[in-house]
Image (tube, rainbow, N blue to C red):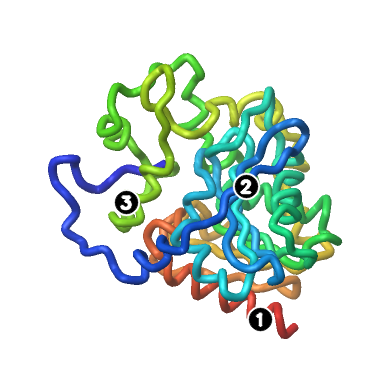
Amino acid sequence: MFRRPHTPDTPPSVEVPAWFTAALSQRPEHATVEVDDCPVHIRLWGDPANPPLVLVHGGGAHSGWWDHIAPFFSATHRVVAPDLSGHGDSGSRACYTLDTWAREVLAASEAGGSPARPTIVGHSMGGWVTSAAAMRYGEQIDSILVIDSPLRDRAPEEGRLRSRRHDSPGYRSEDEILSRFRAVPKQDVTLPFVDQHIARESIRHSDKGWVWKFDPEIFGGELLEQSPAELELLENTFERIPCRVGFLRCEHGVLPPEMAEQIRSILQLRGPFVELAEAGHHPMLDQPLPLVATIRTLLEFWSIT
């Protein structure tokens, strides 16, 4: 979630660039796959004959956060972006675990129709999900890229989102809920045209009024009761998984320099560690084209090694 940097009465002065308009004009296909009796909604771009590229959103977000990113890969890949259960237009569960979400990611890749092993890109909490998938199903995965996910501790989105409850009243109007958007965790810079698109994809009208498209219980139950080994999932994953690994740190993201150096040291001969200059924790909001360029570079690197 994030806040628009202007008020409803003050429209943004930044002109929408042609690349963004062109990207959104490539509208995705929509599909649903059942995973453990829960419907998982997915967005799809590109030809199913191409290798799969799976984009996994962070906590409290949804597949629409990739709407302006995915089209840049649709000519070369079958791009698949799932709504993890409890997010977006997917169903909810009694409890949520990294293992369950990992199964959803693999099921979404298979539903894309490509028989090839996927490359999976996971942002923030989605990086933990991606790492869980690599740990458990690494032989079925070509490579993973983790974006600004801490080695341990709670998910970056948890602190604010776990306080929301099912019985919270909805907002009375669409304008009111849009005005309440916040970056979780906080991000000072977002591109207003990206901001507005994702904002409108992140809400729905219900019998309680206007509400966010995520289950307030995503950070409850078993997800908050991880063992020490689970809390150090990325560290264990980088050392043990059979598929290729890359890490993208955002310069102004959530990883302190000491943790970044630890991750760089762990990777060393395992895969590339890249720092995205000037990017906040949500690079699709403030540095989308550098993010695209970085992912393209890693895909090309992996294709020839």
Residue 2 placement, left or right of 229: left
The location of residue 131, given as percent across then percent down, is: 71, 53
Q: Are marks 2 and 3 in contact (CB under 8 Å)?
A: no
Residue 34 placement, left or right of 79: right
Mark 1 = which residue?
Answer: 301
Q: At 62% from the left edge and 25% from the top edge, which residue is drawn?
A: 220
Q: Is residue 138 above or below residue 209?
A: below
Q: Nearer the viewer, residue 259 or 140?
A: 140
Which one is closest to the eye, mark 1 or mark 3?
1
Disc nearer the start of the sequence (1/3): 3
Q: Quadrant of residue 109?
A: bottom right
- Does residue 150 show up? no
Which one is closest to the eye, mark 2 or mark 1?
2
Quarter holding the C terminus is: bottom right
Quarter holding the N terminus is: top left
Mark 2 = which residue?
Answer: 31
Mark 3 = which residue?
Answer: 188
Q: At 73% from the left edge and 38% from the top edge, which residue is drawn?
A: 34
Q: At 70% from the left edge and 78% from the top edge, which residue is drawn?
A: 302
